[in-house]
Every structure is written in structure tokens, then in C-alpha cells.
Image (tube, rainbow, N blue to C red):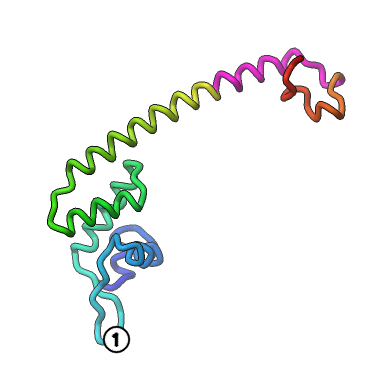
Amino acid sequence: MLIGELADAADLPSQTIRFYERKGLLPPPERGANGYRTYDESALTRLHFVQTAQAAGLTLAEIGSIIDLRDDGNVPCAHVATLIQSKLADVGERIKNLARLEAELERVIERSRSLDPADCNDSDICHILTVPG
């Protein structure tokens, strides 16, 4: 199939496919006599893998490491499991940070309700965000 057909089948722009080729996520395609890229079903399978891996939060570099293992004849499942476990830990940390941010924002909102805008001066810029002293 041509790049436009592959793009349609994968629901991706053609430029994304070219980008993935440059990053090594897709092998260089065959070229027809006219110079057009031609792809087989394995390219579509690989694109679906990349999309699924991205949906799981993996970076393109991490996805590339998985593909490299597979292309070298190794089963990458243990590597994938390690990457996913690391992503889960990162998500847990982000959730904690977001919970702290949520609490801080709620505190600032509550404080802002007790402030009079008439008391805000130029040196404060906005006394809602001034540390009470």
C-alpha cells in the first residue's frame, strides 16, 4: 500500500509516518519504480503497536527500545513490563503532586473569599497571591 493508504488505515497523517521512519520506529519502506513508498501489513501492525504504546504513556524513545529488542530477535515483554511499572509509579507521584496542588488552590480560593479587593495595593500586585505576613 502507498503512504496515503497506510495513513488512512492507521488514522495518522502521512507526515507522522515519515517521522516514525526517521526515528526508526518503522523500517525504511520499499520503493516502487516511481519512487513512491510502498508498505505491507507489517507496517500497519507496527503503527498500531506504536499507537497502543503511546496510549500507555510510553515515549517514542521507550517504544523504540522495545522495537529494537524485537528487531534483534528478543522478546521484549519483560522490558515492556518494567517500563509500564515505571510509568505507573510516575502516575502515582503525579497524582500525589496534583492532590497537593488541589489542596493549595482550595486554600487560596478560600482565602480569597475573605479578602476585599479594595485592600489590594500596587506592591501586592494581587493580594490573593501574596503570602500573608
Q: Is residue 104 above or below residue 52?
A: above
> Residue 120: percent from the left, percent from the top?
84, 23
Name the residue tied to disc 1: 34
Indicate the amino acid at tag 1.
Asn
Query: Which residue appears at 56% of the width and 18% of the height?
Result: 103
Q: Tell me where the magenta segment starts and ends, as one range.
A: 102-118
Give percent across and percent down for residue 35.
Answer: 30, 83
Q: Main secondary structure of the magenta part?
A: helix
Q: Magenta segment: does it hold 109?
A: yes
Q: Residues within 10 Å of mark 1 (few under 14, many from 20)?
A: few
Q: Secondary structure at mark 1?
A: loop
In what quadrant of the picture does the C terminus appear?
A: top right
Query: For the point 38% across and 62% down, which residue is it?
Result: 16
Residue sitting at x 28%, y 40%: 83
Magenta span includes 111: yes
Q: Please tell me whether residue 122 is drawn above or below residue 37 in the rendered image.
A: above
Spot occupied by residue 53 in the image (x, y as percentages of width and height): 29, 47
What x and y, as percent, mark residue 40? 19, 68
Location of residue 21 (image quadrant): bottom left
